Amino acid sequence: MEDTKSLKKEVAKLKAEIDVLKSKKNSSALRSQDEEYQESQVRFRTVFERSRLGNKIISNELKILQVNSAMVALLGYDNKEEIIGTVILDYAPVDCHKDWRFLQQKLWQRATPSFSLETCLQRKDGTIIWCQVTSILFPDKGETLGYTIIEDITEKYNLRTQREEFISVASHELKTPITSLRATLQVISRIVNSENGVNENLRTFVSNAQRHSDRLNRLVGDLLNTTKIEHGELVLNTNRFTLAEVIDGCCSHIQLAGKYHIRYMGDHSLQVVADQHKIDQILINMVNNAVKYAPDADEIVVQVEKIKDFTKISVIDKGPGIPPDKLDKLFDRYYRADENKKQVSGLGLGLYISSEIVRRHGGEIGVESTLGSGSTFWFTLPDNPELIHHVTQPAT
Ligand code: ADP
């Protein structure tokens, strides 16, 4: 009996000791959690403060809650206190307010977890700087704040503008002599082809000269179109036309050369409402690309299909295909997949221009490709001409 009593006492004592140990453990766990939190706060503050890029924390009303020294310097102020508590729109020229509102809308409506755009800010001395703004949302004490990194890209922006202006002026200047050259070559070609006894070599030279001048004309046309897209000047002139006729026309030069067979698949009577000249331009680019980048495959398929309210046009080749990681960049301006750069000439503009033309038509453009099997470049045109933007705006 005595033994049981003392045993019970012993157990109670042990339990009490365990409880004390447990509570100690809990409080040390809490302490270590707290320490970890403090450490991460210090780390965040260090990164935030020492970044060479402007860093700021903003609320959903675009109010500036915190800035680092780089941000103060970027805006041309002397200390943080002058900036904290103001709103970012105070530093944005009026034309750029829409950019910040767009960023606000994209982020706080949870449309995207992070957002990046180019816009302007005005420094204390009134000068304007171009900035690359990248923002992410993060939770903080029950609120959702924006962490924004701002890089001054004024120099890069000015260089880019100069390059675009140079391309615009150069391509305009080149256009007129190229047009005269092509007209002259056309006359010469007519003469050498209609007269008997003309040396066969001369005919070949003239035909080669015409081929090269056509190519030159296309390259300059691409540069001009790029400039037009940048300035929102790509105007669409739409009419109703039969796709098969346009496809025949843009493939005839390849059929004539004889090396490639172009197979048309689909309804020959299918009509669309679109800018015929620009659709022709897209098709020529896609078919020429099939020849350029799939030179060993002898058949190119051009397929037209009616899918719901859209017409889909695809150019299919059985070439080497394109690596998956490059597919989504193919429609970017000046982008060329590396392996082709040296062997095949081009500016990397054809698909960029095509994607802009299709976008203005209210359609979509894309590519599917399998390495070793070939590629399918496609675009769609809506039946509803109301989706077409006749007056064009630069892409945002
Ligand atoms: P360019 O032909 O002048 O380079 P494009 O914008 O027409 O410009 O094409 C961009 C890139 O897409 C090309 O450089 C090439 O790498 C790739 N590409 C286009 N079409 C094909 C194709 N049919 N097969 C493989 N690669 C292609």
Image (cartoon, rainbow, N blue to C red):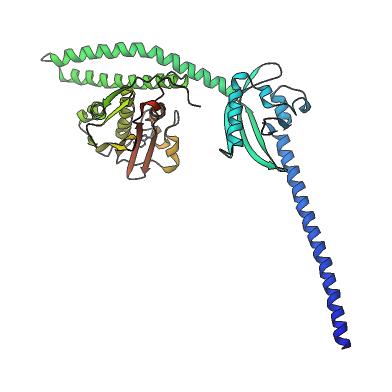
The residue at 41%/23% (across/down) is 389
Name the residue at the bottom extreme: 1
What percent of the width, then of the height, locates residue 213? Answer: 30, 19
Any part of residue 98 in sight: yes
Left or right: residue 166 versus residue 241 is right
Q: Residue at x 29, y 37 (%)?
A: 305
Q: Nearer the viewer, residue 292 or 110?
A: 110
As drawn, the residue found furthest toward the left would be: 196
Q: How many marks?
A: 0
Does residue 67 appear anywhere in the picture?
Answer: no
Q: Quadrant of residue 297?
A: top left
Where residue 222 sits, quadrant-wise, is top left
- Location of ligand 1 given as a quarter of the image: top left
Query: For residue 107, which quarter of the picture?
Result: top right
Q: Quadrant of the N terminus?
A: bottom right
Q: Position of residue 345 (x, y in %)?
A: 36, 28
Position of 64 compared to 306: left or right? Answer: right
Q: Residue at x 60, y 22 (%)?
A: 96
In depth, the one of 184 and 391 nearer the eye is 391
From the top left corner, tell me how far across and down residue 259 is, in percent: 22, 34
Q: Nearer the viewer, residue 44 or 109?
A: 109
Q: Position of residue 180 (x, y in %)?
A: 30, 10
Considering depth in this image, is 20 or 350 the residue closer to the camera?
20
